[in-house]
Amino acid sequence: MVEAQDRAAFAELFAHFAPRVKSFLMRSGASPTLAEDCAQEVMATVWNKSHLYDPTRATVSTWIFTIARNRRIDALRKDRRPEPEDLPWGPEPEPPVADVMAMQQETEMLRVAIRALPDAQRELIEQAYFGDLSHREIAARTGLPLGTIKSRIRLALDRLRHAMK
């Protein structure tokens, strides 16, 4: 079949493997429609690339099911990619001036509220939110117990929440 692309041999191969490939794909989570489409693509690949099959590297079934597995992976990747029409094009529109002003005022209010926190709470808030450290990392750096870190951060957040109202 490889050299001559024998249609009769391929028909036998198709009859044997296409249903098995579809079943394999469905067991891996593909819908019946997707499994059917992928199985068709796999068998078309087998026909078009039969000259690439190397019997010293794998059996025919291993080769075919590897192609099927790769098609399934490609289909999953395609499903997870956003369609081009869903992607934003061009620069984002500028927010309204009123929104920018409100954000600047809130930022300043937050800055003042953070400065008003007791030093112990302010330092932990800065490490957690501006230093991007986990509570465990802060405990390791400061030598304070993890429970103390959590309590102080919770108290600081409550104070900030009230200050921002």
Image: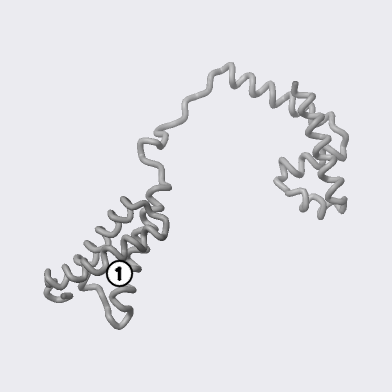
Q: Is 11 above or below relative to 101?
A: below
> 30 and 42: which one is in front?
30
Where's residue 16, x and y in %? 24, 69
Which residue is painted at 28% across and 75% down in the image? 60
Which residue is painted at 33% across and 78% down in the image? 58
Q: Is 106 above or below relative to 64?
A: above
Secondary structure under tag 1 reads: helix
Using residue 95 as the reference point, say whether residue 153 is left or right of it: right
Q: Amino acid at mark 1?
A: Ile
Q: Quadrant of the C terminus?
A: top right
Where's residue 125, x and y in %? 78, 39
Q: Is 18 above or below relative to 125?
A: below
Using residue 85 as the reference point, say whether residue 132 is left or right of it: right
Which residue is painted at 81% across and 39% down in the image? 153
Few, some or many residues within 10 Å of mark 1 (<14, 14–19, 20+): many
Residue 9, image quadrant: bottom left
